[in-house]
Each structure stands twice: as C-alpha cells, then as structure tokens.
Amino acid sequence: MSWQGQMSTIVRYLINDVDPSSYKYSDKRIETSILVASYLVTHDTSFPNDYQINVEQCLLSPDPTDQETKDEAFVVLTSMKTACIIVGSEIKSEASNAISVRDGVSSIDLRGVASTLTVLYKDLCDKYEKLLFDYKEDDRALAGKAILGPYSPGSDFIARTHSDYDFRGGYFRY
C-alpha cells in the first residue's frame, strides 16, 4: 500500500470521515491536503529522508510508508497536520453558517457547530505541536544532555548543596 492509502486512512480516522458510502472528502482532496501538510511539516523540522513534494502532480517521493524508506514520524506528523488543515477549513465553512433563528416558541441555533469544531481544531493542533516538539527533542536527545548552565534544571540544587555560601548572610568560615 502506498502513502496515498495509508496516510489517507489515518487522516480519515482523525477527522471522522471513515464510512466509504458517505465520504465527505474525496480521495483527491485528502491526498492534496496531505501533500500541502507534508510541505509545511518539512519546513517545521528535518527528517532522515529528503522529500520531494509536488502538489500539482500529486507526488511524494520517497514514499514514507515504503519498507525501504519508512519514516513513521513523517507519517504521523503529516497526518496530524493534515487533520488540522481540514478541520480548520470546516470551521471557516461552518462559521459562515452560524445563525440563530427564533420564530415564536421554535428556534434554530447553529452557532454551536463552529465552536465545537474549534475545540476539535485546537485539540488536533495542540497534539501536532506536542508531537513536533517531542520529535525535535528526541532528534537531538544526546546533544547537550550533560551541560549544566546557571539556569539549567538542577543547577539550583547543586548551588545549594555544593556551595560555600551560608544562606544566613555570608560565606562559611572554616
């Protein structure tokens, strides 16, 4: 299965568009959104593979789901970013339909739809940002781990326990 099949399925589950008999989004729209998101994600961070992305021709090379060039971080980050893009576009569409009509005792209020989607959008985008941060952090896991500066976590403990300074007003006198 190529990136179109695997990543489209992941995105469809993230946006809850999983029933093939009533897809809200066409395969072409999902694939195009994945390519746009992959372009944005490759500008947010670097990956082991150098991806060539062509939105017009619907090409992503190398295939991040292929066994030889498998890049799970790229697949997850791009799928999450795609879901953010799609839900963001739904918010824009629903915001223009946010109306409230009252006729006597009957009322129709569609303002809550956009606000509910906004909560979902914020949740998806926050998860994307956390995943991106975690990926960047793991990518540089070894660099700088043993370096302690004056503002590093734990350096205040070292200063308190390994210092000649008396916290009552001066230096210890031996």
Image: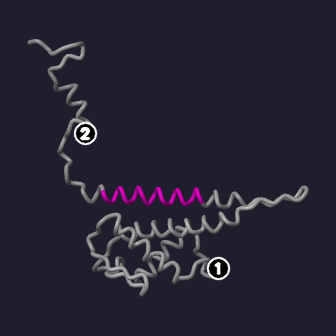
Residue corresponding to mark 1: 22
Residue name at image x 63 percent, y 69 percent: 93
**Residue 150: percent from left, percent from top:** 21, 35
User: In 3D space, how far apart are the residues under numbered discs 2 and 1 (Cα atoms)?
Assistant: 53 Å
Badge 2 crowding class, 10 Å Cα cut-off, few under 14, some 14 to 19, many 20 or more, is: few
The numbered mark at residue 10 is none
Q: Main secondary structure of the magenta part?
A: helix
Residue corresponding to mark 2: 152
Q: Is residue 55 left or right of residue 110?
A: left
Residue name at image x 16 percent, y 24 percent: 163
Question: Over which residues does the magenta segment extend?
Answer: 118-136
**Residue 113: percent from left, percent from top:** 67, 61
Q: Earlier in the sequence, mark 2 or mark 1?
A: 1
**Residue 4: percent from left, percent from top:** 44, 81
Residue name at image x 25 percent, y 37 percent: 151
When asked about the image quadrant of residue 89, the answer is: bottom right
Between 20 and 174, the residue placed more toward the observer is 174
Q: Is residue 10 above or below residue 169?
A: below
